[in-house]
Image: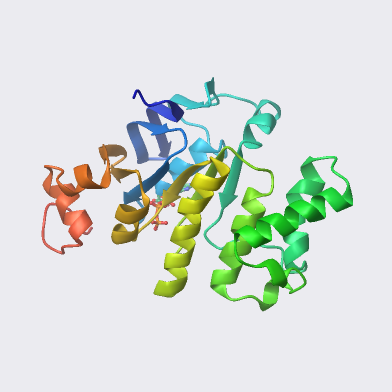
């Protein structure tokens, strides 16, 4: 079956001064997939994600979201495109002055004309989906890291986005909570028919949750494929990275 990409980056370049972070980067992410981006710390994964959601514009190249090139769109043109996205930020980015319910309701009150009762129905449904049905009245500041991630995910899903981006969703969580979040990502994709793009440093989790993995190295995607294809990828850089070996072609400078 030919794959239908929902996100495409073509020959994207992005530099900050003399630092060339993305160098002729191309990738295609299939609709309704869980795609995981792996790569070294500081290698440009967050920069890549910001290009996908239009928070950064490339110096050169195209970023095609759902058939539209957003690379040179104005903020005003971007507004309807951004509605296609939900994002779970590294630090969850909850409003600590609000309770859980209010946090999840926020995008609905901000971006739709739904009535209060419709909004609260959706909030209850999303909180149930992330296993926090009874937690609506808790203040965000009182939550554990794992709960914060789940509230962040419920909020990211509130507007039923086509694409959900996850920036290191399991960092700092215990293994059980990390597994729960990974399961939620897989369920999000299946239940909400969303395309999930995940940045992760957790290679075993990337292998078990991702339909496709993309390895970013020196500003390019040097490997793209199913977990099995990546395991067998014939490149010592990829092999060193996925096995977490200190010795190999990747140098620490
Ligand atoms: N707005 C910016 N201005 C200047 N440099 C930036 C900016 N954003 C990112 N960079 C630089 O781009 C490089 C890549 O950063 P990025 O945050 O994308 O890495 P990462 O792969 O997500 O790292 P980590 O895994 O540690 O989160 C870094 O050297 C960073 O300093």
Say which residue appears at 50% left-offset and 52% top-offset. 187
Say which residue appears at 41% left-offset and 29% top-offset. 9
> Residue 240: which quarter of the image?
bottom left
Say which residue appears at 67% left-offset and 25% top-offset. 77
Q: From the top left corner, tell me how far across and down residue 72 is, in percent.
A: 56, 24
Whether residue 75 appears in this view of the structure is no
- The colour scheme of the drawn protein is rainbow
Q: From the top left corner, tell me how far across and down residue 193 is, in percent.
A: 54, 40
Look at the picture and state if 161 lies above or below 107: above
> Residue 18: which quarter of the image?
top left
As drawn, is 77 to the left or to the right of 9? right
Say which residue appears at 77% left-offset and 47% top-offset. 108
User: How many marks can you see?
Assistant: 0
Look at the picture and state if 28 lies above or below 91: above
Look at the picture and state if 53 lies above or below 165: above
Whether residue 215 appears in this view of the structure is yes
As drawn, is 45 to the left or to the right of 93? left
Q: From the top left corner, tell me how far across and down residue 95 is, in percent.
A: 71, 63
> Residue 48: which quarter of the image?
top left
Q: Viewer-proximal residue, 143 or 15?
A: 143
């Amino acid at each position: 079956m030919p794959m239908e990409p929902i996100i495409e980056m073509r020959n994207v370049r992005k530099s900050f001064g003399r630092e060339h972070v993305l160098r002729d980067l191309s990738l295609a992410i299939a609709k309704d997939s869980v795609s995981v981006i792996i790569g070294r710390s500081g290698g440009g994964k967050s920069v890549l994600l910001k290009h996908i959601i239009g928070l950064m514009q490339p110096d050169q190249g195209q970023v095609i979201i759902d058939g539209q090139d957003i690379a040179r769109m104005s903020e005003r043109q971007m507004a309807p495109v951004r509605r296609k996205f939900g994002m779970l930020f590294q630090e969850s980015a909850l409003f600590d002055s609000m309770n859980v319910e209010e946090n999840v309701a926020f995008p609905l009150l901000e971006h739709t004309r739904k009535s209060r009762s419709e909004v609260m129905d959706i909030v209850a449904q999303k909180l149930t989906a992330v296993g926090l049905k009874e937690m609506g009245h808790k203040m965000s500041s009182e939550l554990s890291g794992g709960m914060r991630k789940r509230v962040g995910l419920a909020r990211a899903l509130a507007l039923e986005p086509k694409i959900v981006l996850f920036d290191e969703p399991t960092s700092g969580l215990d293994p059980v909570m990390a597994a729960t979040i990974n399961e939620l990502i897989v369920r999000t994709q299946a239940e909400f028919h969303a395309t999930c793009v995940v940045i992760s440093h957790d290679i075993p989790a990337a292998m078990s949750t991702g339909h496709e993995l993309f390895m970013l190295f020196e500003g390019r995607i040097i490997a793209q494929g199913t977990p099995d294809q990546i395991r067998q990828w014939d490149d010592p850089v990829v092999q060193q990275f996925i096995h977490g070996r200190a010795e190999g072609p990747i140098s620490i400078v």
